[in-house]
Image: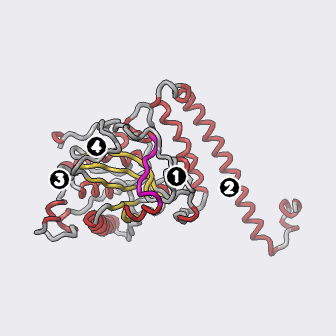
Amino acid sequence: NNTACVNPAFRPKHLEPQYKKAKLTMFKATTISFLFMLTAASQVIAFAPSIARATKTPAAAQTHKQPLRMIGSILDLLGGGDKPLIEPEKALRGRETKMPNIDGYRHYVLGNKLTEVPDGYKEAVFANGCFWGSEKGIWRLPKGIHSTAVGYCAGFTPNPTYEEACSGLTGHTEGVRVVYNPEEVSFVDVLRWFWEAHDPTSGMGQGNDRGSQYRSGFYYFDDEQKQLIEASKAAYEKALEEKTGAQREITTEIAAATDYEKYGGLWYFAEQYHQQYLSKPGSRPYCSAQPQGVALPEYSEWSPFDKDSAEYKKHEPTLPASFWSKYAPKRGCSVVQEPNEPILESAF
């Protein structure tokens, strides 16, 4: 009753744990409400001009989803720890309709269609934190990248929206799809950028972005990709431990693309405004990835293939040491401040 809530002397001692739990719940609810209103008010002030121009200047509308990330991070931090991946049978039902305005859409920087895969080209799909920065690092590689795209991968809900994926109720993680020419850039180069551009030991999240929608993952399309991912994971885990002097267990999810066929597929494109977001006028340089400043060991040290085999030669890195010494991911997710254009080979 009210008296017991106000005066502890009137509370039955055996109910004291319940009172404490209720008090904590009320505190969290009040704090969340306050922070939500504060964030909403600040964003209305900050984005009023952009929202007013949204119908005339599509790029200006890109920023209106940023409050969702900020509020989501606040809720995650107050939630008291990472939540587990949702069970498939409890995920949202989704829909049959594909994401609109993606078919025919061209990469904002590279100019190629996002959905096309030219003959002889390969796909790579990975997740390593907020997909805005993850995508930019890959499209800037100096050669061999036909297109990059952001989307929702490795979940259980067909054709999810951004809001649904952010809720954690679809099982998806924010991912990047790369269409590349293996004759010009090796899968191993893409792998190296993936590992070095984030903290793969951080479980369900990256930096301040917490939740299964920010988990690290790499998803393979054939057995060679699988072997390379698994071998490089072991090598990078060892490198992290040697560099830091502490045990660093990599939590990156590794799975076959075919594992998700029963849920409609591995990959779903995100909304058009998310595509190449950081290259567009009015974008905010947001990135929560946590590069560790540790290099993946040389390919020759961890390759799963015999050095005399065709597979070994097929996957040898194409980007030289001079590239990595100058442009490898740095601590602090500096990629958001880099130019949008691909790196010129003459630059290294």
In front of the other: 44 or 121: 121
In front of the other: 295 or 68: 68
Does residue 235 appear in this view? no
The extreme front residue here reads 96
Give the SS element for disc 1. helix
Q: Hey, which quadrant is residue 338 in on the image?
A: top left
Gap between marks 1 and 2, in whole Å?
24 Å
Query: On the image, numbered disc 3 is attached to which residue?
Result: 318
Query: On the image, numbered disc 1 is attached to which residue?
Result: 165
Whether residue 34 sits left or right of residue 53 in the image: it is right
Give the SS element for disc 2. helix
Disc 2 residue crowd, few under 14, some 14–19, many 20+, Cα 10 Å: some
Amino acid type indicated by mark 4: Arg
Say whether marks 1 and 2 touch (CB < 8 Å). Answer: no
The numbered disc on residue 140 is 4
Q: Which percent across, then down, holds residue 198?
A: 37, 55
For marks 2 and 4 on the same chain, the one whose residue lies earlier in the sequence? 2
Say whether marks 2 and 4 touch (CB < 8 Å). Answer: no
Disc 1 residue crowd, few under 14, some 14–19, many 20+, Cα 10 Å: many
Amino acid type indicated by mark 2: Lys
Range drawn in magenta: 263-271
For discs 1 and 2, the disc positioned in front in the rendered view: 1
Whether residue 313 sits left or right of residue 46 in the image: it is left
Query: On the image, numbered disc 2 is attached to which residue?
Result: 28
Amino acid type indicated by mark 3: Thr
Say whether marks 1 and 3 touch (CB < 8 Å). Answer: no
Q: Which percent across, then down, holds residue 168?
A: 54, 56
Gap between marks 4 and 3, in whole Å?
15 Å
For discs 1 and 3, the disc positioned in front in the rendered view: 1
For marks 2 and 3 on the same chain, the one whose residue lies earlier in the sequence? 2
The image quadrant where one finds the C terminus is top left
